[in-house]
Image (spheres, rainbow, N blue to C red):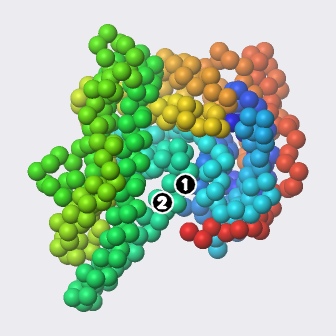
Amino acid sequence: MRVIHLSLADFRNYERAEVGFEAGSNLIVGRNGQGKTNLVEAIAYFASLRSHRVTGDAALIRAAADTGVARMRIAVGEREALLEVELNRQGVNRARVNRNGVKPRQLTRWFSTVLFAPEDLSIVRGEPAVRRRFLDDALVARNPALAGVLADYERVVRQRTALLKSARASGARSSLDATLGLWDEKLVELGARIMVERRRLVEALCAPLIESYRDLADADHSPRLTVEESVGAASDPDVSRETDRSASPPAGGGDPSTALGNVESEVDVSRETIERAFRHALAAVRAQEVERAVTLVGPHRDDLALRLNDLPVKGYASHGESWSFALALRLAVADLLRRESPAGDPVIILDDVFAELDSGRRSRLMAAVGSYEQVIVTAAVEEDVPGEQSWNRIRVSGGEIVEGPSDADGLRTGSDSPGISDSPSTVHEVADDS
C-alpha cells in the first residue's frame, strides 16, 4: 500500500496543497512551524479518523474557514482508489470513496498506516488513556470493523454515566436499578468484545515487540506487555488485575516466537466468561458508582503495563530505553499488519522522530522500516535523517509546497506530480451518523 497523491483545501495552514509521493522513501523537509506535520497528519487521518496531536477535528480546519477537505489517491497492489473527507465546524463530517458517498468510518477499511511521532514517548511515560488509545488505534488498524464497536461502547459509557449523574442530582435512586440494568447489558456486551480483542492483539504483539526492541536498542532487555483489567480487580479484589501477555526471549537469543509457548494465556477464555465477570464487577461497585456518578469498570478504565527487565518502564527506564520501547511498539504493530493484511504493507510515517534519537538509533530505525513499500519522513534538519538511501524530497515553506533543486545525494523533488483531477472543495455525500 502506498500514497500516490494528496490534495488539501483549508486544512491546517494549507489554503491549497498538491503533493505527490513515490514508492520507497519520501522526505518532507522544512523549518519548524511550516506545515510538515500537517501533511502527514492529513494522511494518517484516513486510517484512524483522528489526529495524533489534537482530540477534535475543529483544529484541523484552517482558521476563518468552515470546512476543510482532504483527498488522497492510494495504490493497493495494482489497484488505485480515491479517498476523500470533508471536515465541518458545523454539522457532520462527510466522506467518499471513488466518488461514492460512504460513512467516514469506512475510510479506515481502505487505508492503513503506522505513525511514529515525538508524542509516542507518552505511551510509556504518560497516563493510561494514552496507552488505551494506542491499543484501540492498533485494533482498528488490524480490524476496521472494531471502530464501530469502540464508538458504540464510548457512547454507552457516556449515556450510562449521565444517568448516574442525573440520579444523584435528583435524588431519585429508587427507579435507577431498572434503567441502569439496560445500559449494563450494552456495556457488558460491547466491553467484553473489546476486552477479547485487546487480549488477542497484545498476545500477537509479544514476539515482534521483543524482536523490534532488540533491533532498535541493540540490547536484550526482555520487554513485556501486561493487560491490567478493571473488571478483574473489581470482581475479586484478591485477584491481581494483571492478565499476563508477556514473553521473555529464550536463553541464547533464539527465535523470540518460541518463548510464547511458556506464556500462560487467557486469550482463549470465552466471551461469555468475561461477560459474567463483567456483570459481577458492576454489581460489586454499584454503590460506589451511584455515590460517585461514574462508570468505574470496563475497558475505558483498563491499562497496558510496560516492563523492561521485569521493572516498569515508567519511572525506571532511561530516556533511550523509553524511546526504544515506544518505537518497538510501533514497529511491532507494523509487523503485525504486514503479516496479516491482504492489502500488504501499511504506510510508515516518521514524523520528526529522528531529531529525538541518537545516531545509532536513527540508523537502526531506518533499517527496520526500510523494507516497507512506502516510508514518509518529516524533518526540519536534513542531517538528522540517515542518508543511506535515495529520497524523494518534498519541500515545505509557509503552508506551501515549494520547488527544491536536485543535489548530489540523490534527493529529488516530489512536488511536481500531477494533482487529483477535481480541485478539493467539498464532499456532499453520506454523513457519519455515529
Left/right placement of residue 334 relative to residue 165 reads right
Q: Is residue 167 visible?
A: yes
User: Which element is circle 2 on?
Assistant: helix
Which residue carries the number 1 mark?
Answer: 145
Q: State if disc 1 and disc 2 touch (CB < 8 Å).
A: yes
Q: Residue sitting at 62 percent across and 22 percent down?
A: 371
The x and y percentages for residue 300 are: 35, 58
Amino acid beneath label 1:
Ala
Name of the residue lying farthest toward the left: 238
Residue 95, quarter of picture: bottom right
Using the image as rendered, state which of residue 74 and residue 235 is in the foreground.
235
**Total of numbered circles in the picture?**
2
Q: Which mark is residue 295?
A: none
The x and y percentages for residue 68 are: 71, 61
Q: Is residue 79 above or below residue 70?
A: above
Amino acid beneath label 2:
Val
Q: Dot 1: within a 10 Å radius of its alpha carbon, few (fewer than 14), some, or many (20 or more) residues?
A: some
Q: Residue sitting at 64 percent across and 34 percent down?
A: 344
Quadrant location, the N terminus? top right
Q: Residue sitting at 30 percent across and 47 percent down?
A: 269
Q: Is residue 136 above or below residue 329?
A: below
Q: Which mark is residue 149?
A: 2
Q: CA distance from mark 2 to mark 1?
A: 7 Å
Name of the residue lying farthest toward the top: 252
Q: Is residue 261 above or below residue 389?
A: below
Q: Dot 2: within a 10 Å radius of its alpha carbon, few (fewer than 14), some, or many (20 or more) residues?
A: some
Q: Residue sitting at 15 percent across and 55 percent down?
A: 236
The x and y percentages for residue 329 are: 44, 34
Q: Is residue 34 above or below residue 96?
A: above
User: Which element is circle 1 on?
Assistant: loop
The x and y percentages for residue 241 are: 21, 48
